[in-house]
Amino acid sequence: MARINENYLKLQAGYLFPEIGRRVNAFCEANPQADVIKMGIGDVTQPLCPAIIEAMHKAIDEMAVKATFRGYGPEQGYGFLRDAIAENDYQDRGIDVTADEIFVSDGSKCDSGNLLDIFGDDNVIAVLDPVYPVYVDTNVMAGHTGGASENGRYEKLVYMPVTADSGFEPELPTEHVDLIYLCYPNNPTGTVASRETLEKWVSYAKEHNAIIFYDAAYEAFISEADVVRSIYEIEGAREVAIELRSFSKTAGFTGTRCAFTVIPKTLKGTCKDGTEQLIHPLWNRRHCTKFNGVSYPVQRGAAAAYSDEGKRQIADLVAFYMNNAKLLREGLAVAGFQVFGGVNAPYVWLKTPGDTSSWDFFDQLLEKSHIVGTPGSGFGASGEGYFRLSAFNSLENTEEAIARIQKSVATSV
Ligand code: MLT
């Protein structure tokens, strides 16, 4: 009899977004006439930029000719893309990251889970609450937690609550932790951490020999000049942090798949006997063994995001979504909601009215206004009483959603 990984049985319900999809499908089947506006999962709606499409077409044409055809590429990513990333995202901004510290992959979600392969099973793991569910679920799958309690929190994980009362800034853990997941600009709250907060985290990690997984997938949406874009802007971070970035939201690659992870060559972990071990060769070994690289046309497309034209077109794309975020923030405030985020991130995080639970608000919004959002409690116990709306949509849908919410509030008072 083949034994299964019983850690999977500890996972609660389905993964959040498929669960929302299931509920929405049931609603649509029962109400086929309803014009449902989907603002749940943060999935892009605009097509790829012309500069990217052009580069991909050209790469496909190269694949059609013997002289320019390519088979397996380097697992870590083609030099042309790693160089472009290092130069544009880091070196031009005065940040010390070299091309050979960049590992191109098919997604930050995959990388954040896969990274656990190269770390031990007895680390103490800290996550924010609310949190992107993948960080938690992949640790459950790997057997790093106990079972879930009634409020959905897993034993053995250290949860760091972030709520409006604390300005969405987590307190440092009072106990020792080894691995820390930080995500800024934050999913789901859409808020950012101050430079001082990130400095505190880097010092904590240094003091505790801990490693920070810094998920900066939404970096491109930062609009305020003083907001930290990369953890490596913080002194000492090269000794304690891994950074994850993605083309998914930045350049509309959710269906195209391309991301990257930075592993500084100065980052070390420890063996059981206390000897230090560089992390870079471990990740390189893992990547080469379990991954064959992102396809050539996709990497050519990603590299085109750094051409002058590509940069201009992507800036327009980001501005388009951030205008939706602004309209949502303003429109919801007019409707009387307390609203957070949406300034440096494409997510707006709102407080549900009175003591309405997140899932009750989800049902009300779907049934009354035919709008889908994401219940805050789906991101963790401290997300209860909050709700996330995504700005990834058309302008028409965003305006229509705001009008429906305002109307629904006006008719219910
Ligand atoms: C989200 O809605 O939180 C994201 O789209 C999920 C993801 O990037 O995997």
Image (spheres, helix red, strand yellow):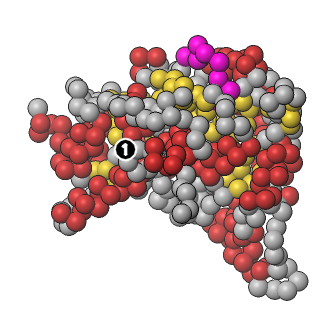
Residue 21 in percent (x, y) is at 35, 57
Q: Is residue 294 magenta?
A: no
Q: Residue at x 66, y 49 (%)?
A: 114
Residue 133's place in the image compared with 161, above or below, is below
Q: Residue at x 85, y 86 (%)?
A: 66
Residue 199 in percent (x, y) is at 69, 19
- Judging by the rendered image, the residue that carries numbered circle 1 is 374
Quadrant placement of the C terminus: top left
Give the left or right position of residue 26, taking residue 345 as reference.
left
Q: Looking at this view, is 54 or 303 the one in front?
A: 303
Residue 110 in percent (x, y) is at 62, 52
**Residue 280 in which image quadrant:** top right
Residue 126 in percent (x, y) is at 58, 28
Give the left or right position of residue 219, taking residue 240 as reference.
left
User: Is the shortest distance between ligand 1 and the CB of mark 1 under 8 Å?
Assistant: yes
Label 1's element? strand
Give the left or right position of residue 88, taking residue 214 as reference.
right
